[in-house]
Image (cartoon, rainbow, N blue to C red):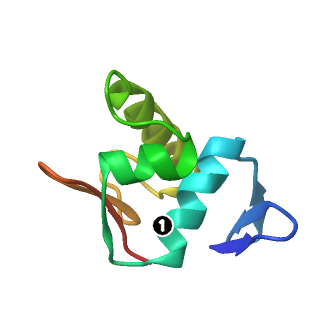
Amino acid sequence: MTLDLSGQKLTVGDEPVELTPTEFALLTLFMEKPGHCFTRSDLLEGTLGYSIEGSGRTLDTHIRNLRQKIEPDPHHPEFIQTVFGIGYRFTP
């Protein structure tokens, strides 16, 4: 997986992957700090610019869509892992 920040492009294997601006922002945050556990609030504020109140399902939708695009098996994610009770972590 290669993320080109200047070109705003993602390549998985040899295939380009189209991301929404929010998906790109999430993946950028994750890849800047691999292994770091981000709270849901961290992710919402870092990508959407607002707090978690009333927005939890919005984040879940973005994470689900991103997993569909980058995970070999989105139902058993390898890269974006759920940390129960806290948030999410990216494992390269």
Q: Label 1 sits on what residue type?
A: Phe
Please state the total of marks drawn on the protein image.
Answer: 1
Q: Position of residue 17 (x, y in %)?
A: 73, 54
Residue at 73%, 63% (x, y): give it: 10
Q: Position of residue 35 (x, y in %)?
A: 33, 78
Q: Residue furthest top?
A: 54
Q: Is residue 72 visible?
A: yes
Badge 1 density bin: few <14, some 14–19, many ≥20, Cα 10 Å? many
Residue at 56%, 40% (x, y): give it: 48
Compared across the picture, whether 53 is left or right of 23 comes to left
- Front residue (pair 61, 41): 41
Residue at 33%, 74% (x, y): give it: 36
Residue at 54%, 41% (x, y): give it: 49
Q: Position of residue 25 (x, y in %)?
A: 62, 54
Q: Is residue 67 visible?
A: no
Which quarter of the rendered picture does the C terminus lie within? Answer: bottom left
In the rendered image, the vertical position of residue 24 relative to residue 15, given as above or below: above
Q: Position of residue 70 (x, y in %)?
A: 55, 56
Regarding mark 1 in the picture, which secondary structure is present there? Answer: helix
Compared across the picture, whether 86 is left or right of 38 comes to left
According to the image, label 1 marks what residue?
30
Which quarter of the rendered picture does the N terminus lie within? Answer: bottom right
- Front residue (pair 12, 2): 2
